[in-house]
């Protein structure tokens, strides 16, 4: 399904989150009233966001080479999120969603290849534990190093909550590791909402260089899962 040409992905996400100004919101309402495609897109995005918002906090961290043992934070896990994405895809009439990876370097089963892009990984950091941060960075490097010859892997890291400390220049002890990964095309995202909450508490947030901060963590997770990326929570 083609996305509406008149509105960006960021505008649609902001609309669903109730963050558009009244003029833009009115324009989008009017447009969706005359565009079944846009109306379907908004319904799909709203449903997907609500389901992921409910589920992604319970996705267990992936087991990483040399990292801490797998921890399960709830009864849901990757099966629930994968099921959500399949259900939403069936409802909306397309299949672009990714599956949760529990073994990031493993080859996917043939039945899963149509639903996941094995070269694309989104790592989600919520922990302020330095060992977990170090493990996440090591895992990103492992994903790059373990790619088959001729395979190009795309890796992004999004941080929110306490995980934002990884990217704060006055807090992190991993600035050099981050810079090295950036030189290898790893893109880092700092959750815009987490930054806003800290600033509302009077905390001045200064990030290490070249950190993207134009998405919330939820928006980035939803967007990349729609694009078929594997999602791994650290």
Image (cartoon, rainbow, N blue to C red):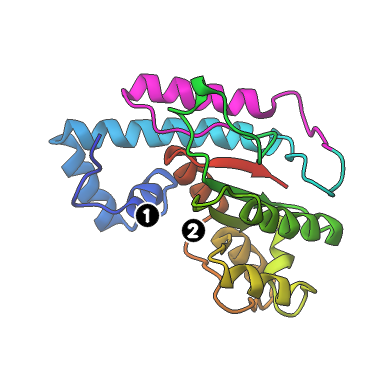
Residue 59, image quadrant: top right
Q: Is residue 119 left or right of residue 42?
A: right
* Mark seen at residue 215: 2
N-terminal-most mark, 1 or 2: 1
Q: Helix or strand or loop: what does disc 2 sit on?
A: loop
Viewer-proximal residue among 95 and 92: 95
Is residue 37 depicted above or below 22 in this figure? above
Q: CA distance from mark 1 to mark 2?
A: 8 Å
Instruction: State the extent of the magenta-drawn residues as a range.
Output: 70-99
Relative vertical location of residue 49 with respect to residue 22 in this rendering, above or below: above
Quarter residue 182 falls in: bottom right
- Residue at x 68% of width, y 59% of height: 141
- When the figure is inspected, residue 213 is found, relative to residue 216, above or below; the finding is below
Tell me the quarter of the image containing the N terminus.
top left
Rendered location of residue 209, percent (x, y): 59, 79
Residue shown at the point (29%, 54%) measured from the top left: 8
Q: Is residue 231 visible?
A: yes
Q: Which residue is mark 1?
A: 10
The residue sitting at 72% across, 60% down in the picture is: 137
Image coordinates of residue 136 in percent, x first then y, are 73, 55
Residue 124: image x %, image y %? Answer: 65, 50
Q: Quadrant of residue 160?
A: bottom right
Q: Are marks 1 and 2 in contact (CB under 8 Å)?
A: yes
Relative side of 5 to 72, left or right = left
């Amino acid at each position: 399904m083609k996305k509406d040409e008149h509105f960006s992905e960021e505008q649609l996400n902001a609309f669903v989150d109730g963050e558009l100004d009244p003029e833009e919101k009115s324009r989008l309402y009017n447009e969706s009233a005359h565009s079944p495609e846009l109306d379907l897109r908004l319904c799909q995005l709203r449903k997907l966001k609500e389901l992921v918002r409910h589920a992604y906090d319970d996705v267990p961290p992936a087991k990483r080479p040399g990292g801490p043992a797998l921890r399960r934070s709830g009864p849901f896990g990757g099966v629930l999120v994968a099921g959500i994405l399949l259900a939403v895809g069936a409802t909306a009439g397309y299949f672009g969603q990714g599956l949760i990876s529990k073994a990031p370097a493993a080859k996917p089963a043939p039945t899963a290849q149509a639903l996941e892009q094995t070269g694309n990984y989104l790592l989600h950091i919520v922990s302020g534990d330095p060992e977990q941060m170090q493990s996440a960075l090591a895992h990103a490097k492992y994903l790059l190093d373990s790619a088959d010859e001729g395979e190009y892997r795309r890796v992004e890291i999004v941080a929110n909550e306490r995980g934002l400390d990884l990217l704060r220049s006055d807090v992190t002890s991993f600035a050099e590791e981050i810079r090295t990964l950036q030189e290898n095309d790893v893109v880092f995202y700092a959750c815009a909402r987490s930054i806003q909450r800290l600033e509302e508490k009077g905390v001045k947030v200064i990030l290490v260089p070249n950190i993207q901060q134009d998405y919330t963590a939820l928006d980035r997770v939803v967007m990349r899962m729609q694009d078929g990326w594997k999602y791994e929570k650290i």
